[in-house]
Image (spheres, rainbow, N blue to C red):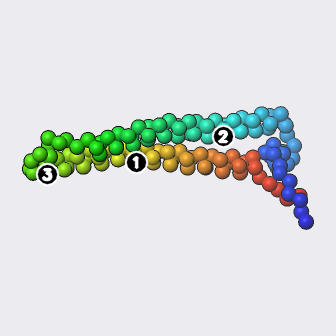
Amino acid sequence: MSKVKKQSFVEKVLAFVKGGDDAKLAKFSDKLSKYYANNIASRQAEIDRLSDRIEDANEELEETILNVNLERINKTDSAESYCETYSKAVAQAKAKVDTLEEQVKGLEEEIKQLEELRDLIFGTETAE
């Protein structure tokens, strides 16, 4: 039965190039690791910021839904014309929430891709 050994990024590259400058490669490995960590962290910070904005936008949507202009609905004619105005206001508030949520989904996908690449580079297992 073969034993599975996890090799570091530096070990894998050194094995591939059959030697070389270990110090330079180790320094590059550190920089690459920080690159992925920083990019993931910055996207997560942006998600946190957007989550706060989503919360505010949802409150704004709720207020828009509840903010019915009672003066405009007193008469049949004005109530009918107000339907479109009211619906547009609700649709705009909902679109704001939807846009922010899509931005979060996009950032989550970017994080997933960065994590997959990071794991591909640093987390490869090889059989001995």
- Name the amino acid, label 1: Asp
- Name the amino acid, label 3: Glu
What residue does disc 3 label?
80
Tell me the element at label 1.
helix
Say left or right for 89 vs 115: left
What residue does disc 1 label?
98
Task: Residue at 75% x, 35% y: name it.
Answer: 30
Task: Residue at 19% x, 49% y: name it.
Answer: 84
Residue 17 in view of the camera:
no
Q: Nearer the viewer, mark 2 or mark 3?
A: 3
What residue does disc 2 label?
36
User: Farthest residue toward the bottom?
Assistant: 1
Say left or right for 1 vs 104: right
Dots 3 and 1: beta carbons under 8 Å? no
Name the N-terminal-most of marks 2 and 1: 2
Tell me the element at label 2.
helix
